[in-house]
Each structure stands twice: as structure tokens, then as C-alpha cells.
Amino acid sequence: MTLPHQPPTAPSPGRLPEPGLHAESGLHAESARLPESPRLPAPEPHRRMILRRLLTLVIIVLLIGIPAGYLVVSAEQSRASGRDKEAESSATGLRDFWPSLMKRRVFEVPIPAGSAHVAYYETSNWKTSRLYVQFSTTPEGLDAFLKDVGTDSGELADGEVTISDRDAATVGWDFDVPDHDWRGTTHRQQDPRPTRDITVDLTEPQRPWVYVVSTTNP
């Protein structure tokens, strides 16, 4: 059966297509496909910037100031040491002190513990250094000293003064005193180790006096 021809249905009110709807949808889709532009970092707060610069300045000052301060202190210590050495070198005669441990090691003069009347004097030039030492000790201390030196009391020659007149005059030692029991020995070693001239006064056997001149040729 043939249906009668019907006129086209008119669009209902309110449902008319909005102009540009399809175009706007296309724009939204195109925008979604475009890459986002990079976000710029937020500006640094003013207070944080000042703190960062201040910290950088402090680090720079420390890096420069600490080495400079160390150099100043080292220079002052060197000058003080030089003044001490100059004063010691310009002094004449024995000093009533123990020589430093370093001097005793360098010149190999092992003063026994408990020694009394300890005094020393040092001379030095480009060729030779000498350490003059005197002390009084006990018979046991004398034996310990000679053993540490590398010798013993059997090597002490009766009536022998092994210290030269020149060295004796340098520090004011007088070995020409009569009625004294002088005994001496010289302990030689290869350079640069020192040679030691040792003279002992055994006039009072229970309180021997020891005189040493240790010479090095660096």
C-alpha cells in the first residue's frame, strides 16, 4: 500500500541548531591538542634572596680569611721563634735550664731523670753545631747515662779530660782545679750523628758531676 506523501516535519521550537556550535567544538579540540607553554618559576622572595647572598658572602670571607689568618699566626710564631733563637745564640755562658727534649735527641745527650745543677749552652754555624751540658747525678744515674750514650764506666780513663780548652773556655768550665778526680771518654759516631766528649768529676763518688760537649756536622 502506498502511503500518502507527508510534508517534512518542522523542527520544534527551542531545538534549532545554534550557529557556530560545531566550530566552537572544533576549537576546543584543537586547544586540547596544543602543547602547554612552560611555566615560569615564581620569583624568589626578597628575604630569601638576601639570606642567600649573605650566606655566599660569609663563605667567601671564611675561605679567604681563615688561610690568611693562619699565615699571619704562622709568621708571628716564626718571628717569635727566631727572636728566641737569636736571644739564645747571643747569650754567653751556660743557661740554668734543661735543654729541650728535641735538643737532647738531636745531640743525643740523655740527661738522667732526677739530675741536679742542669745547665746548657748551644752554638751553631754553617758547618758545626755544639751542645754544652753539665749536670750532677747519682752513681746509678751516671751508669744509666753512659749506657744510653753507648759506653760504660769502664771506658772512663783516669785523669783524662776529653773536653778541649777552647770548648771549656766557651762556657767557663775549669778542669785545672787540683785534687779532682777527672775521668773522661769520647764517643765517636759517623756523621750526621754527634760525637760526644764526656768528662766526669768523681771527686765525690756519690754525687758525680758530668760535663758533655756534643758536636754535630750536618
Image (cartoon, grey):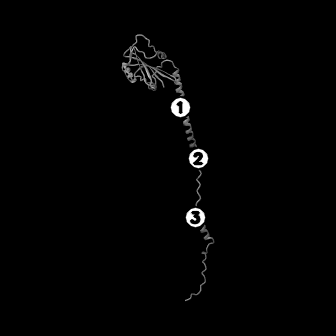
> Residue 116 at x, y = what percent?
41, 19
Judged from this view, the residue extending furthest toward the right is 19
Q: Position of residue 65 (x, y in %)?
A: 56, 37
Which residue is outermost to the front? Answer: 190
Residue 92: assigned label: none
The residue carrying mark 1 is: 74
Instruction: Identify the residue position indicated by label 3 in the image.
Output: 33
Q: Which residue is mark 2?
A: 49
Which quadrant: the N terminus? Answer: bottom right
Q: Residue furthest bottom?
A: 1
For disc 2, the neighbor class at 10 Å (few under 14, some 14 to 19, many from 20) is: few
- Rounded to the nearest angstrom, the CA distance separating label 2 from label 1 is 38 Å
**Place of residue 168 in the rendered image (x, y in percent of width and height, measured from the top left):** 47, 16
Number of residues whose C-alpha sits closer than 10 Å to that of mark 3, classed few (under 14), some (14–19) or many (20 or more): few
Vertical comparison of 123 with 62: above or below: above
Kind of residue sitting beneath label 2: Met
In the picture provided, is 201 more to the left or to the right than 92? left
Secondary element type, mark 2? helix
Compare marks 3 and 2 and give the one earlier in the sequence: 3
